[in-house]
Image (cartoon, rainbow, N blue to C red):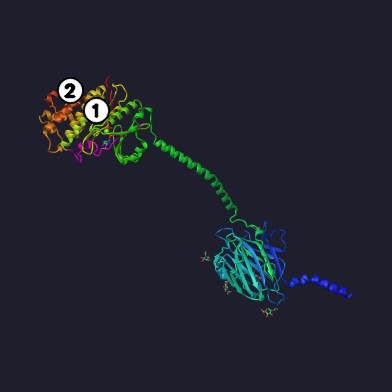
């Protein structure tokens, strides 16, 4: 019987013992996430639990508090007036800013007498106290704040600190957020940056030491705590207390505060959290607007990148095509024989720096002449751009130009090469450093030539023309002899340029063409009448050039007062009639000259520009006269009297026809009277 009783007592003791133990021994709990069904956690205010197990203390509602408490009381003291036992807790949290600029407030781990804080205020009070009870010892509230706004009222150090609070928001010790890493280095942590972080809070019941430690997620607990203090909590905490979290929102500034996992223990170490099991936090910036913009940006870039790619290809192709077109030239089979002197348009383009205006030497009836430097040889060139609308007869033209260009004569401007494009022909000549004869003769030139130099030029041009007429295998008619087509090389030798170019206007095999090409004033009357260029028409123009060089006057000049035309030929006749032909000479030739030579040149000029082609000398004779190998026949002004009249009539007719043209017209279209 006794044994039975004893056994029963023993049995009931053994049954009771767990309960006895629980009141005096350790207690702990662990939440690796707060997944439903959630037991022993009470949510208050705006605190919620998300379906994936996040404890979310705040949401977008303004000026509200959010609390989450473990519903069972925790026995902190073995007797009502006893000492507070050691306790330890750890949790993982994250704070998402809702707006990057206006974020703040923070959250706290709290130990309170009840499982609620109904009178606590939102905003800066963090759901822990209110304006009247802040700092009141009867609160019996112990908290660790993760504060993210600097509140001067509570002497907060900055907008990112961890503090130990007892009955008041004025922390008894605090530190900027961070941790001491393994090497003993302090590393800052930013509370509001959507990163998960872990906090450890330990109270030692014997030494009364409170240690708060934090670290980034997945890092071991640092050895050295972040902030600590020594404070006996026996007067603060009651025998049974409740533990939980608190946070709040303000009028505008707010963040989302999350607790991902939590464990707690009295009289022992808080069990470690299973970090891998914790729920994920939502990424920062998931407001509808931001998502919309983000998606739109993604869409835009998805569309934009291929579009840009295609566009750049299109531009590239266009660039290449344009470049091709820009440098396009035409080469036909018959040109293979000229391959040697055919030049690339690209080279000419670069040589003249893109046919720039400032490289322009001058423009004439056929096109413009540009100065250039060949890129490889550094040779100076003059490029004549001739536009040819009519392509017929071009082959003959090119071959003639090229064959003439290939013959070398010291008084011809050397042709270096040519290039042909769709509507133009480019002729490349040696650059003549001293320019054309024209600029030394007219309009009171800065530099002029003395008689010796002029005579040398005349003889040079005569020998070039003789060469074209008689020394070459076929007769070549220049067609455009005039001062601007006589160029002076470095030694001031006269060199004839633009040979055969006038053919471009009178192209075609019909010698009786109705087009007359040449320059007015140098045109022989028979040329105008028949439309046909002959060696005698070249001699006529050469005669005019002789008079021009000797007199320093243009073939046709305007009288200032009446605007009437004065023919140079008439003028020279006038002086001859008066008995002193030398009065016609250019006063700029200086005093050193041989009267005999000047007189001979003036008379030869008149003879060459005789209106009857048969009366004109040939270039061979002209050369003989100039070289003094033959004497000019003795002529009197009366012998040429009829010539003067004829010329006068011719020019008046011409004047009527060209009423709208200038005096230096190149292409005068004239009916040949048939
Ligand atoms: N090889 C060259 N070297 C230097 N300058 C030149 C050369 N060829 C031409 N020029 C210059 O370019 C200017 C224009 O020449 P262009 O032949 O186009 O016209 P023009 O001789 O006045 O008339 P035309 O078309 O009847 O020949 C000339 O006045 C001359 O000064
Ligand atoms: C915040 O949470 C509370 C409680 O769950 C709810 O009543 C309120 O509508 C929520 N506010 C917003 C803006 O989601
Ligand atoms: C509380 O601790 C102090 C020493 O820190 C000790 O003297 C005292 O007896 C303890 N009180 C109780 C009720 O255990
Ligand atoms: C502050 O809280 C206390 C209880 O702790 C309450 O009695 C008091 O009325 C509250 N004051 C305000 C202003 O809410
Ligand atoms: C850490 O933060 C403090 C201010 O809170 C600042 O003065 C310090 O430069 C920071 N250190 C580093 C390494 O960023
Ligand atoms: C505050 O915390 C720091 C860091 O742990 C510590 O060095 C300091 O002594 C503490 N101050 C007080 C008053 O406890
Ligand atoms: Mg010319």
Label ID, residue 615: 2
Q: Residue furthest left?
A: 579
Within 10 Å of the Cα at label 2, are there few (<14), some (14-19), or many (20+) other Cα atoms?
few
The secondary structure type at the circle numbered 2 is helix
Label 1–label 2 contact, CB within 8 A: no
Magenta highlight range: 424-449
The residue singled out by tag 1 in the image is: 468
Q: Is residue 60 magenta?
A: no
Where residue 426 sits: x, y (%)?
33, 33
Camera-side residue: 183 or 516? 183
Q: Which mark is nearer the camera, 1 or 2?
A: 1
Where residue 441 sits: x, y (%)?
20, 36
Ligand 1 is found in the corner quadrant, namely top left
Residue 652 can be seen, yes or no: no
| Placement of the C terminus among the 4 image quadrants | top left
Q: Residue at x 84, y 73 (%)?
A: 9
């Amino acid at each position: 019987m006794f044994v039975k009783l004893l056994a029963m007592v023993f049995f009931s003791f053994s049954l009771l013992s767990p309960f006895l133990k629980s009141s005096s021994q350790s207690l702990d709990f662990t939440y690796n996430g707060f997944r439903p069904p959630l037991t022993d956690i009470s949510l208050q205010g705006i605190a919620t639990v998300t379906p994936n197990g996040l404890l979310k203390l705040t949401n977008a509602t303004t000026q509200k508090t959010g609390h989450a408490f473990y519903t069972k009381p925790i026995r902190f003291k073995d007797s009502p007036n006893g000492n507070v036992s050691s306790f330890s807790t750890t949790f993982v949290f994250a704070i998402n800013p809702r707006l990057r600029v206006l974020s703040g407030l923070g959250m706290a781990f709290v130990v309170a007498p009840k499982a609620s804080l109904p009178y606590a205020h939102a905003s800066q009070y963090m759901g822990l106290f209110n304006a009247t009870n802040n700092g009141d010892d009867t609160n019996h509230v112990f908290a660790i704040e993760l504060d993210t706004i600097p509140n001067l009222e509570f002497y907060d150090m900055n907008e990112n600190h961890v503090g130990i609070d007892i009955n008041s928001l004025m922390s008894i010790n605090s530190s900027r957020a961070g941790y001491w890493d393994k090497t003993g280095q302090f590393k800052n942590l930013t509370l509001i940056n959507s990163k998960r972080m872990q906090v450890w809070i330990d109270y030692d019941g014997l030494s009364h030491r409170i240690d708060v430690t934090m670290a980034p997620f997945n890092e071991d607990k640092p050895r050295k705590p972040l902030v600590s203090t020594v404070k006996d909590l026996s007067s603060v905490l009651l025998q049974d207390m409740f533990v939980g979290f608190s946070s709040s929102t303000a009028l505008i500034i707010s963040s989302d505060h999350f607790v991902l996992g939590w464990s707690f223990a009295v009289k022992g170490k808080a069990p470690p959290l299973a970090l891998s099991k914790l729920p994920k936090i939502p990424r920062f910036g998931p407001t509808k607007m931001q998502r919309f913009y983000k998606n739109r940006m993604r869409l835009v870039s998805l569309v934009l990148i291929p579009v840009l790619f295609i566009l750049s290809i299109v531009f590239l192709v266009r660039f290449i095509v344009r470049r091709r077109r820009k440098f396009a030239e035409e080469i036909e089979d018959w040109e293979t024989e000229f391959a040697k002197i055919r030049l690339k348009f690209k080279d000419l383009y670069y040589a003249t720096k893109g046919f720039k205006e400032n490289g322009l030497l001058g423009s004439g009836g056929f096109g413009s002449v540009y100065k250039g430097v060949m890129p490889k040889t550094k040779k100076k060139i003059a490029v004549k751009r001739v536009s040819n609308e009519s392509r017929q007869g071009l082959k003959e033209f090119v071959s003639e130009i090229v064959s003439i260009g290939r013959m070398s004569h010291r008084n011809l401007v050397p042709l270096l090469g040519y290039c042909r494009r769709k509507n133009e022909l480019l002729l490349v000549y040696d650059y003549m450093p001293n320019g054309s004869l024209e600029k030394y003769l007219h309009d009171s030139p800065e530099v002029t030539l003395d008689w010796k130099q002029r005579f040398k030029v005349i003889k040079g041009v005569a020998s070039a023309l003789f060469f074209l007429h008689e020394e070459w295998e076929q007769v070549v008619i220049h067609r455009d002899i005039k001062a601007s087509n006589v160029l002076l090389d470095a030694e001031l030798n006269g060199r004839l340029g633009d040979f055969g170019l006038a053919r471009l206007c009178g192209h075609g095999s019909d010698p009786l063409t109705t087009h007359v090409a040449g320059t007015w004033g140098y045109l022989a009357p028979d040329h105008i009448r028949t439309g046909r260029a002959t060696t005698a028409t070249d001699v006529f123009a050469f005669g005019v050039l002789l008079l021009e060089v000797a007199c320093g006057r243009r073939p046709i000049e305007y009288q200032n007062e009446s605007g009437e035309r004065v023919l140079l030929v008439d003028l020279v006749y006038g002086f001859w009639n008066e008995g002193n032909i030398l009065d016609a000479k250019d006063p700029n030739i200086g005093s050193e000259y041989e009267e005999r030579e000047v007189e001979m040149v003036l008379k030869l000029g008149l003879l060459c520009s005789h209106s009857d082609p048969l009366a004109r000398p040939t270039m061979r004779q002209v050369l003989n006269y100039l070289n003094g190998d033959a004497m000019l026949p003795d002529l009197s002004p009366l012998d040429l009297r009829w010539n003067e009249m004829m010329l006068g009539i011719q020019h008046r007719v011409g004047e009527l026809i060209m009423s709208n043209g200038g005096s230096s017209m190149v292409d005068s279209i004239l009916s040949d009277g048939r």
